[in-house]
Image (cartoon, helix red, strand yellow):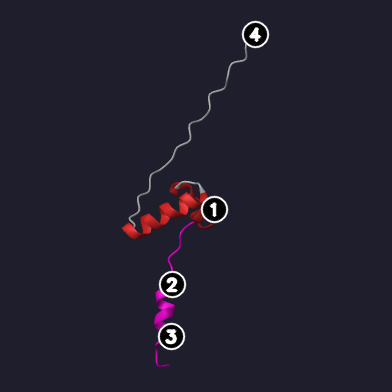
Amino acid sequence: MKKKKNKKRKPTRFKTIKIKVSAKQKKSLENFCKSRRTTPNKIIKKAIRPLLDNYVNAIPTKSNEKVKQLALFSSE
């Protein structure tokens, strides 16, 4: 019998993002992870996933929030 040749998998490419947190926030994150028996990386990914999943193919548009906020204080 012939052996089947394994297909080469396409390597997954990851990008690195760095954030800064205070010492208190880091300790809090570590304690939270210990209580849930998981890693900080998984916690952070799970927290931001719902925010990022809907914007994969979205084209960014200029936000007009500042204009609307200034309109609140006009005397008209």
Q: Earlier in the sequence, mark 4 or mark 1?
A: 4
Q: Residue type at mark 2: give it.
A: Asn
x and y percentages locating residue 37 in the rendered image: 50, 47
* Residue occupied by mark 1: 53
Quadrant including the N terminus: top right
Q: Nearer the viewer, residue 33 or 53?
A: 33
Name the element at disc 3: helix
Question: Vertically, is 76 above or below 62?
Answer: below
Residue lying farthest to the bottom in this orientation = 76
Res. 71 image quadrant: bottom left
Name the element at disc 1: helix
Question: Vertically, is 74 above or below 6?
Answer: below
How many callouts does the rendering have? 4
Q: Residues within 10 Å of mark 1 (few under 14, many from 20)?
A: few
Q: Residue type at mark 3: give it.
A: Leu
Q: Earlier in the sequence, mark 1 or mark 3?
A: 1
* Residue occupied by mark 2: 64
x and y percentages locating residue 19 in the rendered image: 35, 53
Question: Residue 71 in magenta?
Answer: yes
Residue at 40%, 57% (x, y): give it.
28
x and y percentages locating residue 45 in the rendered image: 48, 50
Q: Residue type at mark 4: give it.
A: Lys
Q: Earlier in the sequence, mark 2 or mark 3?
A: 2
Separation of marks 4 and 1 at Cα, in angstroms: 43 Å
Q: Which mark is residue 2?
A: 4
Q: Residue type at mark 1: give it.
A: Asp
Separation of marks 1 and 2 at Cα, in angstroms: 23 Å
Q: Residues within 10 Å of mark 4 (few under 14, many from 20)?
A: few
Start-end of magenta stretch: 53-76
Separation of marks 1 and 3 at Cα, in angstroms: 33 Å
Q: Earlier in the sequence, mark 2 or mark 4?
A: 4
